Amino acid sequence: MPTAKANGIGLYYERAGSGPPLLFISGTGGDLRNKPNQFDGPLPRSFDMVSYDQRGLGQSDKPDVPYSMADYADDAAALMDHLDWADAYVIGVSFGGMVAQELVLRHPQRVRRLVLACTSPGGAGGSSFPFHEIEHLKGVARARYMIPISDTRRDEAWAAANPDPYEKLVELASADPFADEPGHAAGAHRQLEARAGHDTWDRLPQVRCPVLVAAGRYDGIAPLDIQERLAARIPGARLQVFEGGHLFMIQDRTATPAMAAFLLEG
């Protein structure tokens, strides 16, 4: 099991593909044991891609102490040190996009080009959905609450007209096969605590590498207006909107190839 000692903790990671280095930073609750995942898409065909379970999640260490967004960014930089990567392309998705913002601000020399997908700057620029406020919701109740937010097309009328697809979504969204593992609940809680304090808005004009902001047109977790503000705040950033909700990378088959093409431009 590949584990890096990074920033004082053990980080589980996986690696696949060949090409220039790509660090893929996943979102809230990300666990590489959940399949399919980022390694099952097209990115390893073009990159030497590494992704990892962030602190508190999956097979990485879960210290029950407060986490900060700076901790998450420094974890990513320390993992790159372990890999002997001076720099890399970076894709940050949802919470991973928040981490990627901190990474490029705290360690600007480590990021060649950056994709920020379905994420937010926090602060005056606007925040993504406050998951810490619904932490009490579990399983099916949480799934039913979040489905019409994750994709605003999946509203009550859609659910009534499409009962079988809706129930399949509920089943998929409510599954948590590792919920009873030691440290699982505490690590997830610590991540939500850090996420609630995310705010890069005032610092974003400092970003100097090329950036693509990728958004889902029907995303209610990271709404399009926030993506527009995020892109406008970063010098020279490009905004690209895809046909989908928060999971547009799965829903729109053009999304991941477009991200790869942007990274490979330079």
Image (spheres, rainbow, N blue to C red):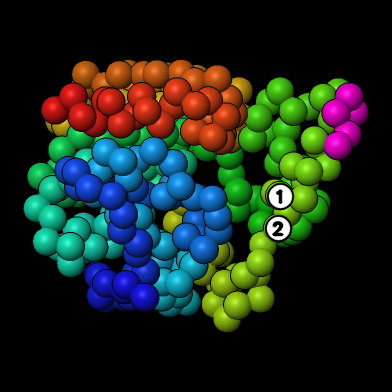
Q: How many numbered discs?
A: 2
Residue 26 is one of the magenta-drawn residues: no
| Residue at the spot 44% in from the left edge and 26% down from the top edge | 255
Which of the numbered marks, if any, corresponds to residue 132?
Answer: none
What secondary structure is marked by label 1?
helix
Which of the numbered marks, if any, corresponds to residue 172?
Answer: 1
The one of 48 and 75 positioned closer to us in this rendering: 48
Asked whether residue 137 appears in the rendered view, the answer is: no
| Residue at the spot 49% in from the left edge and 33% down from the top edge | 249
Residue 58 in the image: x percent, y percent?
49, 67
Residue 82 in the image: x percent, y percent?
18, 67
Residue 33 in the image: x percent, y percent?
52, 63
| Residue at the spot 41% in from the left edge and 71% down from the top edge | 60
Q: Looking at numbered disc 2 in the image, what kind of residue is underneath it? A: Ala
| Residue at the spot 11% in from the left edge and 61% down from the top edge | 84
Q: Looking at numbered disc 1 in the image, what kind of residue is underneath it? A: Leu
Q: Main secondary structure of the magenta part?
A: helix
In the displayed structure, would residue 225 be above or below residue 150? above
> In the rendered structure, which segment of residues is drawn in magenta?
160-164
Asked whether residue 178 appears in the rendered view, the answer is: yes
Mark 2 Cα shell of 10 Å, populated few (<14), some (14-19), many (≥20): few
The one of 171 and 198 positioned closer to us in this rendering: 171
Residue matched to label 2? 175
Residue 29 in the image: x percent, y percent?
53, 57
Quarter of the figure with residue 176: bottom right
The one of 22 and 184 positioned closer to us in this rendering: 22
Q: Are marks 1 and 2 in contact (CB under 8 Å)?
A: yes
* Screen quadrant of the C terminus: top left
What secondary structure is marked by label 2?
loop
